[in-house]
Image (cartoon, rainbow, N blue to C red):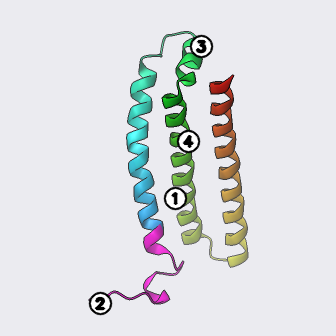
Amino acid sequence: MPMSSSPRDLGSAKSGSHHWLAQRVSALALIVLSLWLVANLLGLVFTPYGNYVYWLKNPINAIGLILFFAASFYHSTLGLQTIIEDYIHRACIRWAVLLLVQGLTLLLAVGSIFSVIFVALK
């Protein structure tokens, strides 16, 4: 079957394959980052708060946690977008809810990443 780049081959949102691929790549990144995070934090379970701060001051750990937050908020935004597009049929409400969800996830992502940077550089 020949490859076509016409808009009718992309689904109703006109970006179906990109969205699908982005969701799979972010899920794969989350698997790796989650395993890394759990493995690192299991060693700190019964230790004082200062050990967590010391752990976060390591640049590798800070970057890994920032990547974890970025991937998880990006992945959740993609998933929520799919749900909203599938179940909210009125265009004006769908647009408003998508804008609200994307704004909130961006705000939470920036806040989380800023918190990691703040603790790591303190």
Q: Which of marks 4 and 1 is nearer the N terminus?
A: 4
Give the CA separation, mark 2 to mark 3: 59 Å
Residue 12 in the image, given as x and y percentages of width and height: 52, 81
Q: Which of marks 1 and 3 is nearer the N terminus?
A: 3
Q: Earlier in the sequence, mark 1 or mark 2?
A: 2
Name the kind of residue labelled 1 in the image: Gly
Quarter of the image with the C terminus is: top right
Give the CA separation, mark 4 to mark 1: 15 Å
Q: Which residue was labeled with disc 2?
A: 2
Name the kind of residue labelled 2 in the image: Pro
Quarter of the image with the N terminus is: bottom left
At 69% from the left and 71% from the top, the residue drawn is 95
Q: Which residue was labeled with disc 4?
A: 69
Q: Which residue lies furthest to the left in this view?
A: 1
Q: Which residue was labeled with disc 1?
A: 79
Q: Which of marks 2 and 3 is nearer the N terminus?
A: 2
Tell me if label 1 and label 2 are in contact, CB under 8 Å: no
Estimate how packed mark 4 is, as few (under 14), some (14 to 19) or many (20 or more) residues with alpha carbons within 10 Å: many
The magenta segment is 1-18
Give the CA separation, mark 3 to mark 4: 21 Å
Please give the label number shown on residue 49. 3
Compared with 35, 9 (above or below) is below
Give the CA separation, mark 1 to mark 2: 30 Å
Q: Is mark 3 on a helix, strand or loop?
A: helix
**Disc number lying in front (2 or 3):** 2
Q: In this view, does 81 lie to the left or right of 3?
A: right
Tell me if label 3 and label 4 are in contact, CB under 8 Å: no
Q: Earlier in the sequence, mark 2 or mark 4?
A: 2
Estimate how packed mark 3 is, as few (under 14), some (14 to 19) or many (20 or more) residues with alpha carbons within 10 Å: few
Give the CA separation, mark 1 to mark 3: 34 Å
